[in-house]
Image: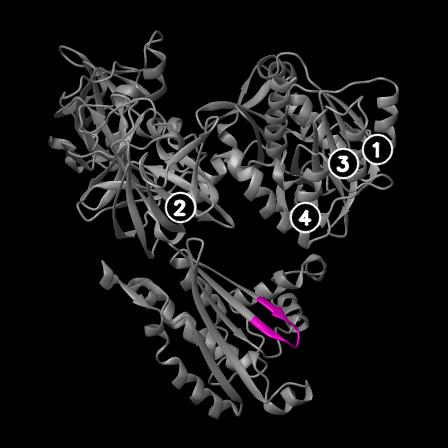
Amino acid sequence: MKTRMQPIGNAWQKLPRIVRDLSHELGKKIELKMIGAETELDRQVLELIKDPLTHMIRNSADHGLEKPDKRQAAGKTDLGTIKLNAYHEGGHVIIQISDDGAGLNIERIKQKAISSGLATEAELEEMSDLQIGNFIFKAGFSTAEKITSVSGRGVGMDVVRTNIEKIGGTVDVRSTQGKGSVFTVKIPLTLAIVSALVVESYGERFAIPQISVIELVRASDNSEHKIEQLKSSPVLRLRDQLLPLVYLNDVLRMNRKAPPVSGIDGGQDNLVAGKRPKDDFVVVTQVGAFRFGIVVDRVFDTEEIVVKPVAPILRHISVFSGNTILGDGSVIMILDPNGIANMYGNIAVDQDETKVEAAVTEEGDKKVSLLIFRAGDDTPKAVPLSLVARLEELDCSIVEHSNGRDVIQYRGQLMPLVRISDNYPLRTEGRQQMLVFTDETRTMGLAVDEIVDIVEDVLKIELTSDTTGIVGTAVIANAATEVIDVSHYLVVAFPDWFEESRKTRVKAARRILLIDDSPFFRNMLAPVLGTAGYKVTAVENAEQALALRDEGFTFDAIVSDIEMPGISGFELASMIKADERWGDTPIVAISAHGTADDFERGRAVGFSDYVVKMDRGALLRSLTETLSVYGEAV
Amino acid sequence: MSTNTMQTDNEARMPGNTATSDYVTMSVGGQLFGIPVLEVHDVFVPSKLAHVPMAPPEVAGVLNLRGRIVTAIDLRQRLGFEPRDPGAQVMAVVIEYQGEPYSLLVDAVGEVLSLEANCFERNPSNLDAKLRDVSEGIFRLEDRLMVVIQLDKIILLLNGAMAA
């Protein structure tokens, strides 16, 4: 297996020579820096990316870097640099080719795009520089004014892209005018070979990618490492820190005896249900900044494995990233530590997800990802991407009619398909795009005409709407866009949506006070909480909340925004905690803009939990937990 | 195989046609099933099956067939029969759906039958719901009845994936 893996440097060997020749030919001073030449790649992949890489280097030298005189005029040294950087990242091999040249000439790309009919001026107007930059990957696109022996012959970046996509990779370009451009080639691991640790739990073997394994700890009752329980949560003392643990058999729901599938021997026979060996092995795993331990029964060797994607019917299981055939011919599943961390909501949400998401939201000022689509009329419509479970395209012929409604068979269930408005009928032939919304067990599809884009923008409702199904109108990507009210369509799809969930999920309706200055979030979160069976009172600001307190209202929990004009969420929390009337009521902080500091500060002033606004799943989990904790305490 | 091996792929799969079509027969829980012979890629006795936790109950596991990873679907589970006794004989019938190999676990694989279309009829109205989901129709053989399995339904209903 090892011999299949070769350092990427092997594909780079000829590059210094090529660059030296180019620098003579073009009259430019060029320096080539190569980093990460030892990064290993599947030999096959290596062969396939050799040519695209060479082409991209030529391109950077010819188009990217300027002539020495121009460089000096731009205040740069006359020595241009091309940097090649390769590394492994999150299941991919990344190769970056960057130059410190002039960057992409966006204006010229625009002209070229228009003249070759790839886009209209109006379309270009809507596009970001990033999108425009990606035109260079279109077939026949060359902006080189003169055709040189080096480049500009029109068979360029599109061939590069085709070759890279052939092996399941992606390529994109980021460029800063005057500073240079960075091409990023991403090749998925499925073709690459990874080193994985083979472990066993309940008689089944699994592979954990070595890349996320930090160390292995043997834990037994009489050694220094002992698994301890906090109520029902297992933890391990590891060098003066508590490491949260998950049992692999719990993660994979293998605590029950494996179902008697067939007469086939399901691997090892040492299947002892309900009894765990005294010695456990803890695989200390890192996902992002979050560390946790996976407890397994046995640890075998590490093996070099070829990751193969799992069959489509198993692809929804998030704890597996693939499967592979081991040296002995047996098939094993490859665990995805990311999926495990996400499954263990309480671990990941508390510490990891909030931080990660906070870090994401931090960058843009309250920007959210919005899915822009068209349905019915020409006005663009938007919905927060976090509410959308999936995007699907279906053949109109599979739409069936039942009980006066349109339904389709989707993942083995009937899924209602609703239209944006009764005035716009469904297409009868061809393909229909739809957005899929899910909530626990139910799924609905919203038929749309066209999915336009996904944009990051500040969501500010400028005009509220009386039209059912529309929350209001906001300016998104420089266009007036209607923000749709998902909860309306959920009710259209399932008239009993709210009642059902109320019955099943919360025995006595818990009262929640929701404080948020943004009408959008009030409109979005109130139905979400309502759906989960809570009785929601929504107010705009802290003053109104305190007024309710003075009037003698009580609530089981308070969900409060942090950033509010006037009294902030932090101030409100300390005021509530200081007064005995609501002093015992748990407060969950929600914020679009959360940092680790905010989180700490929130805890200090008495927030019970802290979740990111757009993550409604986390909010619901947090409320359930908070209320059950307080419920027991009271 | 019979006289009609020259038939096109398409005709062989259409029981409505007046000609005969070839089916591989297999038994699951005492019931006889048939799959068009051209759909069957392989028949073998599975030896080692890796269980996939959290998979749908119909998925018995994954196995290695000459270097390819094949997802095994237990037809007994899938069609609502009693689970097999431990140690009972199992056969695997390999088919392909959308370029992905699947193996159907059955109790036994019989022979290849050339059947005439006039022995074929649509599903009787009282057919068991699980069978109706996947059955294309019934062949009346001399001594027993054979259910023709629609492979896409077996996988599709499990998968739920839209024609992606």
Q: Mark 4 lies on which chain?
A: A
Q: Mark 2 points at which residue?
A: A284
In this view, the residue in front, B72 or A415, is B72
In the image, residue A405 lies at what x, y percent?
A: 59, 19
Q: Name the residue under label 4.
A: A597
In the image, residue A103 lies at what x, y percent?
A: 61, 75
Q: Choose the circle earlier in sequence order: 3 or 1.
A: 3
Q: Which of the labelled discs sits on residue A270, or is there none?
A: none
- Look at the picture and state if A293 lies above or below A214: above
Q: Choose the circle earlier in sequence order: 2 or 4.
A: 2
**Amino acid found under the numbered disc labelled 1:** Ala
Callout 2: SS: strand
Q: Mark 1 lies on which chain?
A: A
Callout 1: SS: helix
Q: Choose the circle earlier in sequence order: 2 or 1.
A: 2
Q: Which of the labelled discs sits on residue A542, or is there none?
A: 1
**Amino acid found under the numbered disc labelled 2:** Val
Q: Choose the circle earlier in sequence order: 1 or 4.
A: 1
Mark 4 nearby-residue class (10 Å; few <14, some 14–19, many ≥20): few
CA gap between label 3 and label 1 equals 17 Å
Q: Name the residue under label 3.
A: A520
CA gap between label 2 and label 3 equals 42 Å
CA gap between label 2 and label 1 equals 44 Å
| Region of the chain picked out in magenta, as a range | A174-181
The quadrant the N terminus of chain B occupies is top left
Mark 2 nearby-residue class (10 Å; few <14, some 14–19, many ≥20): many
Quadrant for residue A372, please give it: top right
In this view, the residue in front, A153 or A59, is A59
Mark 3 nearby-residue class (10 Å; few <14, some 14–19, many ≥20): some
Residue B15: tell me if it is visible.
no
**Amino acid found under the numbered disc labelled 3:** Phe
Q: Choose the circle earlier in sequence order: 3 or 4.
A: 3
